[in-house]
Image (spheres, rainbow, N blue to C red):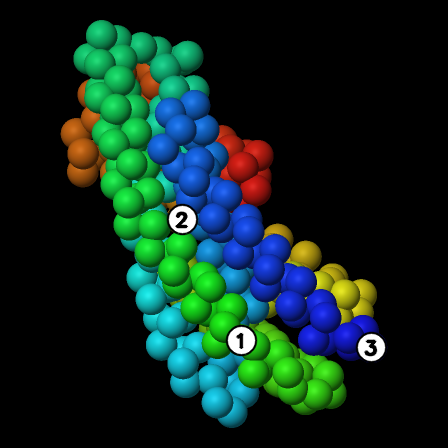
Amino acid sequence: MSASARRILKRRLARYCRDILLARQQLSAADNGEALHQLRIGLRQLRSLLRGLSTLPGAAPLLRLSAQLRQLACAGNDWRDREVRLALLQQAAGAADSSDFAAWRRRELTALQAGRLDLQQQAMALDALLPALQRACIPLLARRNRRLRCTLRRALLQTRRRYRRARRDWRRQPDDALLAHRLRLLAKRLRYQIEACGKLLGRRWQRRAQRARDWQQQLGDERDRQLLLQSIERDRIPLPAAARRWLEQGAGAKLGGLLSATGGA
C-alpha cells in the first residue's frame, strides 16, 4: 500500500458514483437488459469501498447512509434473478418450445420491463443519496494516508479471516447448502473489497481476489442451478419436457456460463 490512499479512494468513490448514476438512468431502456446488472455491480463496489471507511472514527453519518444504500441494492435482487432465468429459458426454448411456453416468456419480458421502470423510480433516491455519501466521506478521506491504509487493511483482514473460517467449515460439511452460501457471500465480499482498494494493494491481494472469485463462481453455479429448477416449479412455468431435460442435464454449466458472460452476478 505505497500509493496515496486519499487520491486513489477519492477517484474510486467518484467513479463508482458515476457508474451507478449512468446505470440508473438506463434502467428504463427496453433494449438494455444489462442496466440492472451494471447497477447492482456498481452498488456492490461502492458498498465494499464504504465498508472499510465506516470503521474510522466519525463515520456514524456514513453508516446511516450506507444502510439506505443497502436497501436500494436489495430491491433489485429478485428482478435480476428473473432476468437471468428468462435468458436461460430463452436458450432452453431452442431445445423445445410450445405456444404456452412462448406466451409465458412474452409475459415475463413485459413484467421485467415494468419492473425496471419501478426500480428506476426507487433508484431516483440515489440522485440525492450518492452526493450525501460523498460529503460524508470528505472528512474521512482527509485522514493521513497511513491511517487510511491501516484502516483498509484491518477491514480486509477481518473479512479474510471470516472467509477462511467459512471455507474451513464448508470443507468439513461440503453438503451443507447454508455453509456453501455463506462461503460464497464472503468470497464475493472479499473480492470486491480488494478490488475497491485498487493499486493500494500488491499482487498477493490481487491473487487472493482471483481465488475468491473462483470460489464464488464454483459455489454459485450449483446454488443457482438448484434455485432455477425450484423457481420453475414454484412459478408453474409451462416448460416443455425436452426443455426441462436440457436444463436438468446441464443447468449448472449453462447458468455459470451465462453469469460469466455478464460479469458474474
Coordinates of residue 189 in the picture (x, y in percent):
52, 65
Q: Label 2 near label 3: C-beta < 8 Å?
A: no
Q: Is residue 211 left or right of residue 50?
A: right
- Identified at 40% across, 13% down, the residue is 95
Alpha carbon separation for disc pair 3 and 1: 21 Å
Residue under label 1, please give it: 137
Q: Nearer the viewer, mark 3 or mark 1?
A: 1
Residue 214 visible in rendering:
yes
Q: Is residue 88 left or right of residue 18?
A: left
Rendered image: mark on residue 2 = 3
Q: Nearer the viewer, mark 3 or mark 2?
A: 3
Residue under label 2, please give it: 223
Name the amino acid, label 2: Arg
In which quarter of the view is residue 86 placed? top left
SS at mark 2 in the image: helix
Name the amino acid, label 1: Cys
First along the sequence among labels 1 and 2: 1
Q: Is residue 133 left or right of residue 190?
A: left
Name the amino acid, label 3: Ser
First along the sequence among labels 3 and 1: 3
In which quarter of the view is residue 210 placed? bottom right
